[in-house]
Image (cartoon, rainbow, N blue to C red):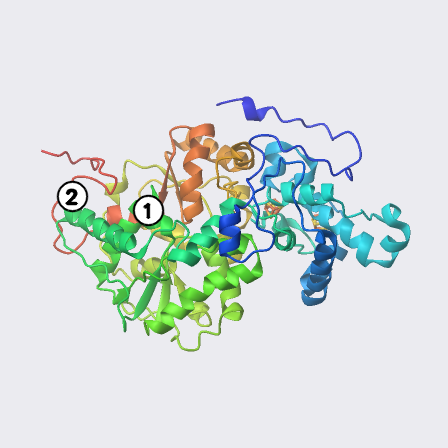
Amino acid sequence: MPKELLQIEQAPPRGDWTDATVQFRKGSFCYGATPKSASYLGLPNPRKWQPFDADWQLPSDWKQTLLAGMKERLNKYRSFRLFMDICVRCGACFDKCHFYLGSSDAKNMPALRAELLRSVYRRYFTLSGRIFGALAGGRELTEDVVKEWFYYFYQCTECRRCSVFCPYGIDTAEITMFARELLDSIGCGINWVIEPAANCFRTGNHLGIPPHAFKDSLEFAAGEVKELTGIGIEVPINRKGAEVLFVMPSADYFGEPHYYTLLGYLMLFHEIGLDYTVSAFASEGGNFGLFSSHELTKRLNAKIYEEAKRLRVKWILGGECGHMWRVLHQYMDTMNGPADFLEPPVSPITGTPFDNARSTGAVHICEFTADLLYHNRLRVDPSRNDRWNVTFHDSCNPSRAMGLLEEPRYVIKRTCRNFHEMPEDTIREKTFCCGSGAGLGTDENLEVRLRGGFPRANAVKYVKEKHGVNLLACICAIDKATLPTLMEYWVPGVEVAGVHELLGNALVMTGEKERLTDLRGEPLPGRSEQ
Ligand code: SF4
Ligand code: SF4
């Protein structure tokens, strides 16, 4: 195992934590949003800047803007005021953040991360702080504090692991969201969030893929399915009157290993004869607005409902994505809903009503497939996945934000014969983040990602050494994009796959020719090409 990042300084930091000076060292921060993308979204203070610049070219009224923004949110969101007031510094969350575990930087302890904002709240919004200042735990809002916010609130993946352990239910992810909104209000967003969001506005998806390329990509995938199975399939696009609108993250039709997940979906839909359509307008399930502001989340999310309405579908089926599900499950209903033009989702194959999705009209693909398998409506041959020794990474959002714990496991266990769980305190609600979510999955902050992903990787290493695990399955597009790098660094020899890739391998389609390879083109165990 490479040792460089294991040199973690465990001694408590010397000096006063209230000193806000931050060193923007290579590998430890994300680049600032470009003026082009920020302008496209109409965000404030678009300019060419980088965090390592001495002068951040903040607007002249930056301080008033931030304090007014805090005041507005304190009045509007009871949760924000509560989170600012109630932390008792019990310490339960201190060692629960993967960024703290991987770096030992005290300001990555959830309670101290929140304190960066809370200290300013105390100084300006509490009587004791206004009178006694630092003696009452207050801090002046300075440019250095703004830079410190930027540094540490972009070293939080909004994963919510810390909140599972907080006896008061303080959700540091929400505190990070508030802080990022405030930073955006003075033009201090990161490019890895703002550019995908701008792309989404322009072309419908984060990667900026235009509709004709979206169509080409899906047709190419259909060709791959034909080559593999001998079965010709159609991928309906923008078809009005279909029963179901299928929405997926754009990486599924453009990235690897995501693409194999897409093949799995398409094979499944063809096999069960699902009456569905995809949309070239809602060609992105993900929502990078979530990593910027409530307003941007809402703007990006709206297109899914608009498209469901325009296409007159009955309900929405969503693919393997992480934060997409946080938005669909927790915010969409009140943000752009209620979706009273949709019908309560019912599986057309098994008749199962998805009561949990009644208000949003959106069903997760793992719920849908697990139900099909449970009712024995799919023929599967798990031996086709015998080259894999599988473990499952609970992606933070589907697990902690929507409680999707059993369904993916059920699909894996029905389609694979070798499955091993990672240690109990690293899975399900207590899952460790990949270290690259919430807009941090870029290259310039690689050291932060590898450090933050260390606890996850360490648990994978454990099952690799104990059980010979060689595949990390997951149901999140960001995981599929970033876990391969993490594995390559910490646990070489472990690959990454979506759950519906495993389903696609195992699925015995009606009329298929003998399969000799899996979806990756690798020989199936026990079969050889002539
Ligand atoms: S667990 Fe909750 S109350 Fe305890 S220190 Fe952390 S945030 Fe504060
Ligand atoms: S990264 Fe996750 S565990 Fe760490 S502070 Fe943020 S929400 Fe909490």
Q: Earlier in the sequence, mark 1 or mark 2?
A: 1
Residue 171 spot, x, y in % from top left: 64, 54
Q: Is 214 on the left or on the right of 8, as rendered?
A: left
Give the amino acid at mark 2: Arg
Residue in the foreground of this view, choosing between 4 and 302 = 302
Q: Nearer the viewer, residue 198 or 335?
A: 198
Q: 478 and 207: which one is in front?
A: 207
Q: Give the vertical position of 222 relative to 72 (above or below).
A: above
Q: Secondary structure at mark 1?
A: loop
**Tag shown at residue 515:** 2
Residue at image coords 34%, 69%? 352
Which residue is identified by label 1? 254
Q: Position of residue 266 (x, y in %)?
A: 25, 55
Tell which residue pokes out farthest to the right in this image.
131
Element at badge 2?
A: loop
Q: CA distance from mark 1 to mark 2?
A: 24 Å
Callout 2: few (<14), some (14-19), or many (20+) C-alpha neighbours within 10 Å?
some
